[in-house]
Image (tube, rainbow, N blue to C red):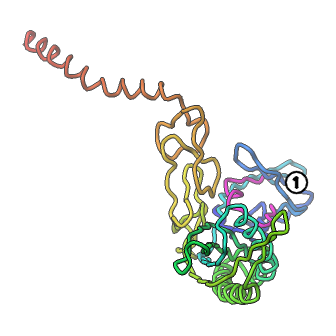
Amino acid sequence: GLVFIHTESSQYSLPCSPIDMKVADATYNWVQDREDPKLLLVTKEGHLLFQHFQASDSGKYSCTISYKKHGVPVSQTFHYSIFGYHVPGALDTVLLFHSTLCEEKWTKKFLWDLQDKLRKLEMEQHCKVQLTATFCFPSLNNPSDEFIIQVQLEVSLFGPRWDEPCNLQNMEKVTDCYRKTVEHNLGKVQLALTRFFKEHKSFQITGTDTSSINFTNEFVGFLKTKQCSEGFGQTRELQRCLDCCIACPPGTFSPPKASQCSPCPVGTYSLIYGVAFCTPCKDSMITRVSGASSITDCVKKERTQQVDSIVHRIPVLILIILPAILALNFLFI
C-alpha cells in the first residue's frame, strides 16, 4: 500500500500488517528495496519505526510475518511504498548590515557568529535557519568607506519536535493539524526573528590580533512562501493534501524554489528520493536517455555514438536498397 510520512516527523510507526493479526510468537522481517539499505529500527510488535523521517527514507519496503497455525509454519509478506512529504510553508528573510570592510575573512567570521547566536532561537521555535546567499557592495552614501552586507536566510519550520501538537492525531486529520501548525509557527518565527535583531543590533567581530569590526543591522525583511523544499515537488499524489510537496523519486530532481520534479538530464542520474541536483556520470560517460536512476545507466560515449550512427545510417541504406528491390519486382512481373 501507499504510505505518506511527513518529513522531520518526530516518530512514525508502521505496522507489518495493514490489518490487526492476533498471532502468538510471530517473527517479523522488514526489508528495504535499495542498493544500500539502511539499518531498520523494528519494535518487538513488528512495527517499523522512523525517527525524524527524511526524504531519503522514502522507497519500497516489505515485511514478512512468520508464525505457526495449528503447528504448521505460515508466513505472509506485505509490501509498502513509502513517500516523504511536507505541507508548503517557509519564511525567506533578507538582512542588510553596514560595515567598514568588505573582506571575505571578516564576513565569514560575522556569518559564523550570526548563525551561532541564532541556534537558541532555532531550538525555542522548533525551526531551522539556513544561510542561502551573501552579497557585499559599497553603500550609496559613503561608497569608499562604508559597505552593505546583504544576508539571505531561509527558515524551515520543520525543526526538532515541530510536530508535537499533532502527535495524537489520526492519519486522516494529521495533515490538517500539520498545516495549522505551520501557519501558526510562521507568525511566531517572524516575530521571534524581529525581536532577535532588535536585541542584536550590532555584531562586533574580533580578529586574530586586537583589531575588531562592527556589522550593524539596518534592515530586516520577510517573505512567507508556499514553495516546496529542494528535492520535493507538487505531484498531487496525496489526495488529502493536493498542494503538499512529495519527495522526488529516483531519476528526478528539484532544485531550490522549483516546486516540480524534473527528469535528470542526459549524462546524470539520481539514486534516492528527494535530491536537489542529479549526479553527473564519471569519466565523461553519458546516459542514453534522461531520467536515469542508476549508475549502471552511465555508458561510454563512444558506444552511444556508434548506436546513434547506425540508427542514422538506416534510412540511407533503405534509400540505396529500395530501388534495387523495386527493379527486381518489375523483372518478375
Residue at horizontal 65 percent and vertical 84 percent from the top? 186
Residue at horizontal 60 percent and vertical 63 percent from the top? 230
Answer with the quarter of the image where residue 51 lies: bottom right
Q: Position of residue 174 (x, y in %)?
A: 69, 80
Residue at horizontal 76 percent and vertical 78 percent from the top? 203
Examine the structure image and report whether residue 58 is included in the region drawn in magenta. Answer: yes
Q: Is residue 192 left or right of residue 154?
A: right
* In this view, 159 is above or below 261: below
Q: Which residue is mark 1?
A: 27
Instruction: Report the magenta residues as a range.
Output: 48-64
Examine the structure image and report whether residue 321 is included in the region drawn in magenta. Answer: no
Amino acid tagged 1: Thr
Q: Quadrant of the C terminus?
A: top left
> Closest to the observer: 160 or 92?
92
Answer with the quarter of the image where residue 106 lies: bottom right
Q: Residues within 10 Å of mark 1 (few under 14, many from 20)?
A: some
